[in-house]
Image: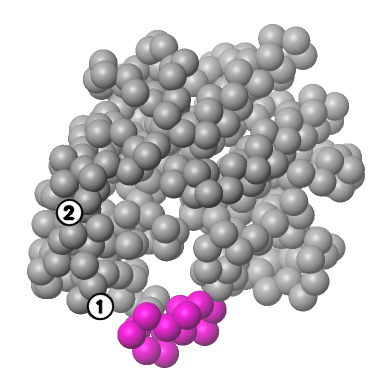
């Protein structure tokens, strides 16, 4: 199929593009390449897929040097007219929408960025899917939509009407917006509630990256809620596999509107997660214990029975193995002379 992947230079988007290309699909990647975090890492991800660094913003599509069925375009999903032109020209069959303003804590500092990208941008994607006969839209939601729920593990049938961050509120809004388009226009939509995704090529603002970076440089780790946090850490390969299973499913098997948890299915104590990092780096962490941050929740835990029943989803990577894989990538990427010293700042 021909598939549009928004957020193609992002963490999950990069891995999803590689998977879709390996499966033989024709892929168009889209990303606005903003500077929310080190843009060098985004350029490096593009380079891994054979895409040269765009010379100007919103340039013409750039063909991959290594994949004949992949090209990339720098474009912001909030630009409705340009997005509509892209849809009209390309005639996508499926859309994998991963572009968003991410991060719970940043939403406290810059709420407008979330309204702009996650609400206006998502509405533009829905409109383009509606008017250009897209067969199916898969989009990224988040475990954060469960907010202050005290019933665990979190199930897709749980009420999710008390988010505790603006980021969570925008992601829940996306689910409601998608439901409306599925009901009114028959657009098939599948929302994926991702749980604490980590792995190679991860974002520098995520816990995995921050902890490894601090430990290797001898800086203190900021450990919130005095370490009494539990997260359903999910390896990016398992996340991408869930997308693969849904794309491979027959059209009849896919409901008009659906939501799925995508997680590891078991919570890990933050301090145990840090111990795994210590084991694979061979260094001890200096911990700075802090109170709970605004917008955070104490525990996340995904019930993945629905995804398992409908698509045969199985977790393939343990947290300890995933931590080891991330550290191996980090050490390769940021070692002196490594690709990170070309595309991003040097960490050693």
From the image, which quarter does the N terminus lie in? top right
Tell me the colour scheme of the image. one colour
| Number of the label disc, if any, that sits on residue 217 | 1
Task: Report the residue marked by disc 2.
Answer: 289
Name the spot of residue 113 as percent of width and height, x first: 64, 46
Q: From the viewer's side, name the closer residue of 304 and 225.
A: 225
Furthest-bottom residue in this view? 337
| Inter-mark Cα distance, 1 to 2 | 18 Å
Residue 152 figure quarter: top left
- Label 2 SS: strand
Q: Relative to 300, say whether 258 is above or below.
A: above
Q: Relative to 37, say whether 22 is above or below.
A: above
- The reply to whether discs 1 and 2 touch (Cβ–Cβ < 8 Å) is no
Residue 67 figure quarter: bottom right
- Asked if residue 20 shows in the view, the reply is no
Residue at x 14% of width, y 66% of height = 285
State whether the magenta stretch is mostly helix, strand or loop: loop
Q: From the viewer's side, name the closer residue of 117 and 28.
A: 117
- Classify residue 1 as left or right of residue 248: right
Highlighted magenta segment, given as a residue range: 335-348
- Asked if residue 115 shows in the view, the reply is yes
| Number of the label disc, if any, that sits on residue 117 | none
Q: For residue 30: magenta? A: no
Mark nearest the camera among 1 and 2 is 2
From the image, which quarter does the C terminus lie in? bottom left
Q: From the viewer's side, name the closer residue of 254 and 73.
A: 73
Instruction: Please rate how many residues cluster around mark 2, counting C-alpha atoms within 10 Å: few if below 14, some from 14 to 19, many from 20.
Output: some
Residue at x 67% of width, y 33% of height = 119
- Label 1 SS: helix
């Amino acid at each position: 199929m021909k598939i549009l992947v928004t957020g193609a230079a992002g963490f999950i988007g990069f891995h999803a593009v590689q998977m879709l290309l390996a499966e033989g699909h024709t892929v168009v990647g889209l990303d606005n390449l903003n500077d929310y975090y080190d843009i060098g890492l985004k350029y490096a991800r593009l380079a891994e897929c054979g895409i040269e660094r765009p010379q100007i913003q919103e340039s013409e599509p750039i063909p991959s040097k290594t994949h004949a069925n992949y090209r990339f375009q720098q474009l912001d999903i909030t630009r409705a007219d340009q997005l509509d032109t892209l849809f009209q020209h390309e005639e996508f069959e499926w859309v994998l929408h991963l572009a968003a303003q991410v991060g719970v804590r940043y939403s406290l500092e810059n709420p407008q960025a979330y309204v702009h990208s996650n609400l206006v941008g998502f509405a533009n994607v829905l409109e383009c899917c509606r008017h250009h006969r897209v067969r199916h839209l898969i989009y990224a939601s988040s475990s954060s939509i469960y907010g202050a729920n005290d019933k665990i593990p979190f199930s897709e049938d749980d009420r999710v009407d008390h988010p505790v961050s603006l980021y969570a509120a925008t992601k829940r809004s996306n689910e409601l917006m998608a439901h409306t388009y599925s009901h009114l226009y028959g657009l098939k939509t599948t929302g994926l509630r991702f749980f604490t995704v980590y792995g190679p090529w991860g974002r520098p603002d995520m816990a995995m990256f921050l902890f490894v970076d601090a430990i290797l440089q001898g800086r203190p780790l900021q450990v919130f809620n005095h370490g009494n946090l539990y997260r359903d850490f999910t390896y990016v390969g398992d996340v991408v596999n869930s997308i693969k299973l849904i794309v491979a499913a027959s059209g009849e098997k896919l409901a008009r509107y659906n939501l799925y948890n995508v997680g590891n299915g078991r919570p890990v104590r933050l301090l145990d997660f840090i111990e795994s990092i210590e084991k694979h780096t061979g260094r001890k962490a200096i911990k700075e214990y802090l109170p709970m941050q605004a917008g955070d929740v104490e525990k996340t835990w995904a019930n993945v029975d629905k995804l398992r029943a409908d698509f045969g989803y199985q977790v393939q990577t343990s947290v300890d193995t995933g931590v080891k894989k991330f550290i191996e990538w980090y050490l390769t990427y940021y070692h002196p002379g490594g690709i990170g010293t070309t595309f991003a700042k040097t960490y050693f």
